[in-house]
Image (cartoon, helix red, strand yellow):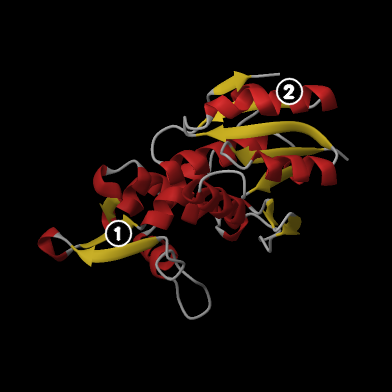
């Protein structure tokens, strides 16, 4: 089996070379914030000798939101079992964003420390599989609302669920966690004493990340390098 290595583009190209030496590699996907583009020629020269393809994907918008969008599309466009995320090659914040996106999507991740490759304890299943379809429907609806906020009554009407069912998915009960206890939503009392539901920062990232992509051609902002 050959791997598709996903790595932030940064100064530490050696960590990418370490991964390539350890894992048979089909392609390298470089996640770029616009920095360190001068290192591309060096990596391309090495990849050409090894007959490994290289593709740059630009991270658009906010770092975390952009990273989650890329990972959501990539896990659908590329065989998920073949994806291996390098969280050592970029700047610290970019590496952290890549690790967070790996964890949520259940992707394998690795780091290089003292020239040694270490596989990180990332979940072996996607975070999205923990969320039933109706909870995801609530997250997606809230994402598109002003301030990512809505009343329970509007949620029920727009998602075509009963008010008790919406309340159950938001608040949970003794046997099942709701979006609040999962850290994805919060509530406050709004106008006329109505309970308002709003996404937390994690909830916003999860709702952004749940995207389907049918093929590699759908990967965001590609720049073919090899």
Asked if disc 2 and disc 1 are in contact, CB closer than 8 Å, the reply is no
Mark 2 is surrounded, within 10 Å at the Cα level, by few (under 14), some (14 to 19) or many (20 or more) other residues, namely few
Q: Residue furthest bottom?
A: 174
State the residue in front, 83 or 17. 17
Q: Earlier in the sequence, mark 2 or mark 1?
A: 2
Image height of 225 relative to 131, above or below = above
Percent x, y of residue 6:
66, 39
Give the label on residue 186, or none: none
Percent x, y of residue 99:
58, 53
At mark 1, the secondary structure is strand
Percent x, y of residue 75:
65, 40
Measured Cα–Cα span from mark 2 to mark 1 = 52 Å
- What is the quadrant of residue 179 in the picture? bottom left
Q: Residue furthest right?
A: 1
Question: Which residue is pictured at 56% across the width and 48% down the height?
Answer: 98
Give the label on residue 45, or none: 2
Left or right: 149, with 100 as reference point = left
Percent x, y of residue 43:
69, 29
Give the label on residue 197, or none: 1
Count the marks.
2
């Amino acid at each position: 089996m050959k791997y598709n290595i996903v790595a932030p583009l940064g100064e530490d190209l050696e960590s990418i070379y370490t991964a390539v030496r350890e894992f048979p590699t089909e392609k390298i996907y470089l996640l770029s914030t616009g920095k360190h583009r001068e290192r591309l020629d060096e990596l391309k020269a090495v990849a050409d000798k090894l007959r490994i393809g290289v593709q740059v994907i630009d991270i658009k918008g906010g770092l975390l939101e952009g990273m989650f969008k890329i990972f959501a599309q990539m896990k659908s466009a590329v065989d998920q079992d073949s994806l291996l995320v390098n969280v050592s090659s970029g700047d610290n914040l970019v590496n952290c964003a890549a690790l967070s996106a790996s964890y949520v999507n259940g992707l394998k991740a690795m780091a290089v420390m003292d020239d040694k490759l270490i596989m990180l304890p990332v979940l072996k299943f996607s975070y999205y599989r923990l969320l039933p379809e109706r909870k995801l429907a609530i997250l997606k609806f809230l994402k598109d609302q002003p301030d990512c906020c809505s009343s329970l009554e509007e949620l029920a009407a727009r998602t075509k669920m009963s008010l008790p069912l919406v309340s159950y998915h938001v608040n949970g009960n003794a046997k099942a966690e709701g979006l609040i206890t999962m850290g994805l939503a919060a509530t406050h009392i709004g106008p006329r004493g109505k309970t308002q539901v709003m996404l937390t920062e994690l909830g916003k990232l999860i709702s952004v990340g749940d995207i389907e992509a049918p093929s590699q051609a759908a990967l965001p902002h590609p720049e073919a390098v090899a």
